[in-house]
Image (cartoon, rainbow, N blue to C red):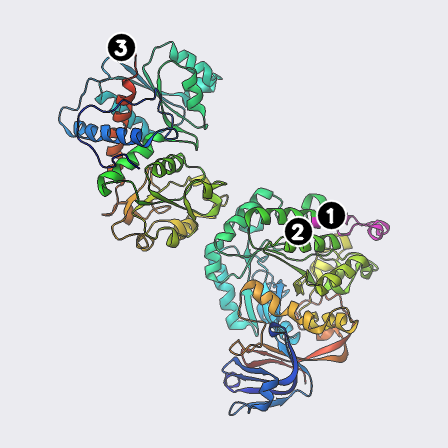
Amino acid sequence: MSANQTSRGGGPHPAFPHRHLLGIEGLQPQEILGLLDRAEEAIEVSRQVEKKKAVLRGRTQINLFFEASTRTQSSFEIAGKRLGADVMNMSVSSSSVKKGETLIDTAATLNAMHPDILVVRHHAAGAVELLANKIDCSVINAGDGPHEHPTQALLDALTMRRHKGKIARLVVAICGDILHSRVARSNIILLNALGARVKVIAPSTLLPAGIEKMGVEVHSSMKEGLRDADIVMMLRLQRERMAGSFVPSVREYFRYWGLDREKLSYAKPDALVMHPGPMNRGVEIDPEIADGPQSLIREQVEMGVAVRMAALEALAEHLPNK
Amino acid sequence: MADSARPVALINARVMDPSRNLDEAGSVFVADGKILAAGPQASTDTPPEGAEVIDVKGAVVAPGLVDMCVSVGEPGAEHRETLASASEAAAAGGVTTIVTLPETNPVIDDPALVDFLLRRARDTALVNVRPMAALTKGLKGEEMSEIGLLGEAGAVAFTNGHRSIASSRTMRRLLTYARDFGALVIHHTEDPELAANGVMNEGLNASWKGLSGSPREAEFIMLERDLRLVALTRGRYHAQMISCSDSAEAIRQAKRAGLDVTAAVSINHLTLNENDIGPYRTFFKMAPPLREEDDRQAMIGSLADGTIDIVVSNHDPQDVETKRHPFAEAEDGAIGLETLLAAGLRLVHSEDVPLLKLLAAMTCNPARRLGIDAGTLRPGAPADITVFDPDRPWILDETKIRSKSKNTPFEDARFSGHVLMTIVAGRTVYNYA
């Protein structure tokens, strides 16, 4: 790991060599760190009274969400607007898809409207990449099924770096529904790229096949898994998965895998708690912890806007100027 | 409780402790509810002070039996059997620990119900009661039960009773999830689709009788599926009751492959076959069904060679209201706690299975598989003991059966071998005088 892991000062950033941001997979450590550095500046912008930059002035950003998401969509919307873009939100689940339009049809339709940046969330893994191949503008993956959610991993990394100074050699425990989680996959790739030690903790029914070969330590007990952890990252468990299919019940899940004061005590004393939201208080996390002094959960939301501004700005450099 | 406080010395005994491969003349000393000493060396020691010295005159002194498959009517069918009546039957049969099935009303699928059973047992039962909990909610075979919380409440293993889990996906997830808790998954394998509505073993016998048959394949196809899933998940698995040679072969191969697998057979499938059904006798209707003689011989051989680890009674009290029906309409099930040991001794007298091996399958093997402190005469272990004369002849008299239900397949049967005394935690709970 030769890249400088701590944040660098302002000034021009090294060019981001990709036209799209489809995943963390395929990004070099320096590129990841470059995005984090850009995001540091975006934080400053967001904390000013005058929050507007002109990087995307005159550009059109379409947020194309095939799956509802209040928080990610509004985060991208604010990020785009702060950079001066015209932002349009499309919730496709309620419109054309129901009328039988295919993903490719949608791409062609949108293409004709000449957007500059498309932010896409889709329930199917690989759908965003498929769309990117069929459209002329830059595409950001805002989550494709259980595959990747790159801006979430970046905002998590930014949050960690700001509190722990670096990512390398941090012990990060990712707990909960790894099987269905794009957040987990993107984080595992990013954290490994930056030299962190990653542990995953879940009931075995919520672990994907081959997990032990993904560069992580695998645990089913929180007590063992949380040992030495600097960061405890909790994942959301969908309600429909708690009623006997993957885990028997909410109360059993909380008893063995919900983060409460006792389980958090197995981690390092200065461990910090993260959650991509939205949280199920009393399922995967005790409200006392979610709202407690070790929690970074609110800060993650702020970092989300900054990271999305950084990503939009990095991709904007590839947009044609004439 | 003064009795339990008083030490006991059983002298002139044939001490048989399969947990230590011990079969020698000696004595067994008991104090404070625990085994103090058991074996030949105890004979030269002096009994504990104030001990009641009992000369057993050459009878066998062995660990109390652990019966890993017992149905009790409590809660929900107390008219058939209560924990109290089942425990009396157990004590008379030399059984000191009964492991109960969760197939009650309500089904034992909630930690509070495990707690209830343990309290009822503590207050009413003469012997130890270790409940198993339901593998799936309501035994419906769909949603997994709270294996972690049920285990903490005291469930020693998880079974779906006499109902098989048809969904391979559910079974896979159960094995996977249970492994995180080190929990034992116990399964009765009879593919409900293939078994259709079979009421006895499929074959010539059923055909002549005009009864629909359940093929042996219904058992071993599902067992083979389970064993494949055990290989995939690395779960802990116990075949609740097997009844045919192909099932034994599947278990044999799974063990050879290093899987964490064990199997049990019911005493009925070791000592009876489908011909015993005779003129549609419903006390011989059970699940799995009694098979042909070849399969019974295969069960005996598999017990003798160690493929089958455990022998159970599959005690299942049914009464007139459920049994006095045309064969096809009667409920499955036979009682067996009182006759488990006596019937098992038939295999010893016929020289098919050595006595120490039979005792292992009824004591230390089930105890070890369940991880409970029972089935051994090791010093320090709970003083759960059975004393029996392996040769004493007797005839089962239906009127003397202690179970509330009388559905025994051994009515008027001749046995060689009778329990003389049963001790639980140092206290005598049965005395044949």
For numbered disc 1, what is the local secondary structure? Answer: helix
Q: Is residue B74 visible?
A: no
Residue sitting farthest toward the top: A322
**Magenta-tinted stretch:** B198-220
Q: Which residue is mark 2?
A: B189
Q: Is residue A21 above or below residue B409?
A: above
Q: Position of residue B405 (x, y in %)?
A: 68, 67
At x 62%, y 85%, the residue is B40
Instruction: Check the residue under mark 3 and report the chain it is in.
Output: A
For numbered disc 2, what is the local secondary structure? Answer: loop
At x 60%, y 61%, the residue is B77
Q: Which residue is mark 3?
A: A321
Residue type at tag 3: Asn
Q: Residue B106 falls in which quadrant of the image?
A: bottom right
Q: CA distance from mark 1 to mark 3?
A: 73 Å
Whether pointer 2 and pointer 1 mark residues with C-beta atoms closer than 8 Å, the reply is no
Instruction: Check the residue under mark 1 and report the chain it is in.
Output: B
Within 10 Å of disc 2 (Cα), the crowding (few <14, some 14-19, many 20+) is many
Q: Which mark is residue B217?
A: 1
Residue type at tag 1: Glu
